[in-house]
Image (spheres, rainbow, N blue to C red):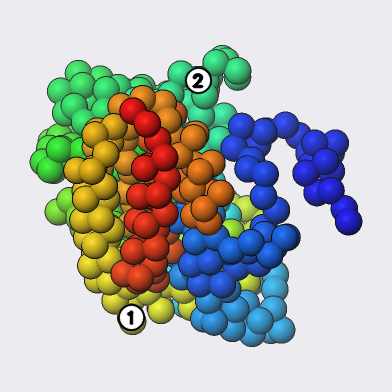
């Protein structure tokens, strides 16, 4: 039998060495996945918050099959139906007016920053700086690495592209202090995901919105992790009572098929022909699956059920917090939740969960993050809480 882990060691660049677990996944269905030895796991990672309808959902599979038979790819010289169906669905169900499709989160964010700079050139006397926050994560291209407010991402690649100002998170005064005549936009995640689910103060985003309005600068929301129902609202911004000028999406938009999207209000949709593009952007296969996935999410009020099951998960985790004093905090919204410990036990917890058939993620050495498929039910939550309880009871603190 082929040793896949050995093959990875031999041929693959070493980029994933820190996160790879000793498991070869071969199959998925609903909220469950199976490894090559037949062991079953409950998946509370969902491919890093991607598999929003779970694994191999019939709606995703049907759309993939149908579009694969019809038209997989053509260039943007031509109009294609799925691209425009998905565009219309997004516009009819959000506060934004225009879309550009990309292939990943970082690409959508790159597009957003280019659009903001274009806006700066046209309407803000050439302003080009974008303010972002410490602890944020916006992707891995050079520009998005600079936008990401984490020094450790910058160090291996300095010098960083200029034009990004990283400031303290959840601090409106820090944004105010960093705003100058060179500022064209503020770019934020409604909830910082990769930093361990950092939920801002209730009025923070409202204050940022007001500040951007008063200065005439743009507010870009990176909803790559928080969008598509994850917080219990279709878009994260609805959870915070504001509207962005620009919003970026990726991850769950096509239920597991790579796609990204950059959405903007009409007044800042200032790209002119030739400003932006990409071979695979708006690819019919990805857009057809995106259309089917998003339509299912909207038609079946998946955000509403995320709210309920998310509440149930939160209650279960708070119960565990009462029982295990080494849990210092349980936080999050909907199905984006983190458990923080008083010491760096997250790697031990993650491995013990794996052993017991539960997949979790560890964004920090003292934090685990849960971001299951949006279609999980209370029984799945009971099972996850049962496994966590068992794992925690084996941890002496
Ligand atoms: C908030 C946020 N922005 C951007 C990205 C980058 O997306 P991608 O990995 O698709 O480039 C991520 C990925 O985790 C993310 O969570």
Figure quadrant of the N terminus: bottom right
Residue at which label 1 appears: 300
Q: Which mark identifies residue 261?
A: none
Q: Residues within 10 Å of mark 2 (few under 14, many from 20)?
A: few
Sequence-wise first label, 2 or 1: 2
At x 72%, y 60%, the residue is: 37
> Which of the two residues, 93 or 273, is positioned nearer the viewer here?
93
Task: Name the residue tied to disc 2.
Answer: 152
Residue 134 at least partly seen: yes
* Residue 76 visible to the viewer: no
The residues tagged by marks 2 and 1 sit, at their Cα atoms, a distance apart of 41 Å
- Image spot of residue 186 (x, y percent): 29, 34
Is 207 positioned to the left or the right of 219 in the image? left
User: Quadrant of the image for the C terminus?
Assistant: top left
Q: Residue at x 24, y 62 (%)?
A: 312
Q: Secondary structure at mark 1?
A: loop
Q: Nearer the viewer, residue 362 or 139?
A: 362
Q: 120 or 218: which is nearer to us?
A: 218
| Secondary structure found at label 2 | helix
- Which image quarter: residue 311? bottom left
Q: What residue is drawn where x is 53% and y is 66%?
A: 32
Question: Can you give x and y, in whole percent of width and height, for residue 344 in the image?
Answer: 41, 26
In this view, 336 is above or below 344: below
- Marks counted in the figure total 2
The location of residue 97, given as percent across then percent down, is 32, 63
Q: Residues within 10 Å of mark 1 (few under 14, many from 20)?
A: few
- Tell whether 34 sits left or right of 317: right
Q: Position of residue 343 (x, y in %)?
A: 36, 25
Question: Looking at the image, which residue sits at the far right?
Answer: 1
Residue at coordinates 48% horizontally, 78% vertically from top-left?
A: 292
């Amino acid at each position: 039998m082929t040793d896949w882990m050995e093959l990875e060691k031999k041929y693959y660049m070493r980029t994933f060495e820190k996160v790879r677990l000793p498991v070869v996944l071969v199959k998925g269905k609903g909220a469950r996945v199976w490894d090559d030895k037949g062991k079953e796991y409950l998946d509370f990672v969902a491919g890093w918050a991607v598999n929003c309808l779970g694994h191999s959902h019939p709606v995703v599979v049907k759309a993939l099959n149908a579009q694969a038979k019809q038209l997989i790819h053509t260039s943007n010289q031509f109009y294609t139906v799925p691209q425009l169906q998905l565009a219309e669905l997004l516009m009819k169900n959000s506060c934004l007016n225009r879309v550009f499709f990309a292939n990943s989160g970082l690409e959508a964010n790159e597009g957003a920053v280019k659009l903001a700079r274009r806006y700066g050139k046209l309407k803000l006397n050439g302003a080009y700086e974008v303010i972002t926050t410490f602890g944020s994560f916006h992707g891995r291209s050079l520009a998005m690495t600079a936008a990401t407010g984490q020094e450790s991402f910058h160090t291996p690649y300095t010098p960083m592209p200029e034009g990004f100002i990283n400031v303290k998170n959840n601090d409106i005064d820090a944004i105010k202090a960093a705003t100058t005549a060179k500022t064209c936009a503020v770019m934020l995640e409604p909830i910082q995901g990769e930093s361990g689910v950092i939920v801002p103060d209730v009025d923070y985003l409202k204050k940022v919105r007001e500040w951007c309005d008063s200065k005439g600068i743009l507010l870009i929301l990176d909803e790559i992790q928080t969008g598509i129902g994850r917080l219990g609202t279709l878009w994260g911004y609805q959870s915070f009572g504001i509207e962005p000028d620009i919003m970026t999406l990726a991850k769950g938009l096509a239920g597991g098929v790579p796609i990204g999207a950059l959405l903007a209000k009409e007044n800042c949709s200032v790209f002119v022909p030739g400003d932006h593009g990409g071979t695979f952007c708006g690819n019919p296969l990805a857009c057809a699956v995106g259309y089917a996935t998003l339509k299912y999410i909207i038609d079946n009020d998946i955000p509403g059920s995320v709210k309920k099951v998310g509440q149930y998960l939160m209650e279960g985790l708070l119960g565990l917090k009462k029982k295990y004093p080494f849990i210092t905090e349980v936080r999050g919204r909907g199905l984006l939740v983190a458990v923080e410990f008083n010491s760096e036990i997250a790697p031990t917890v993650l491995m013990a969960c794996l052993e017991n058939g539960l997949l979790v993620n560890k964004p920090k050495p003292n934090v685990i993050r849960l971001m299951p498929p949006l279609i999980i039910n209370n029984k799945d939550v009971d099972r996850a809480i049962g496994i966590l309880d068992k794992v925690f009871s084996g941890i002496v603190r």
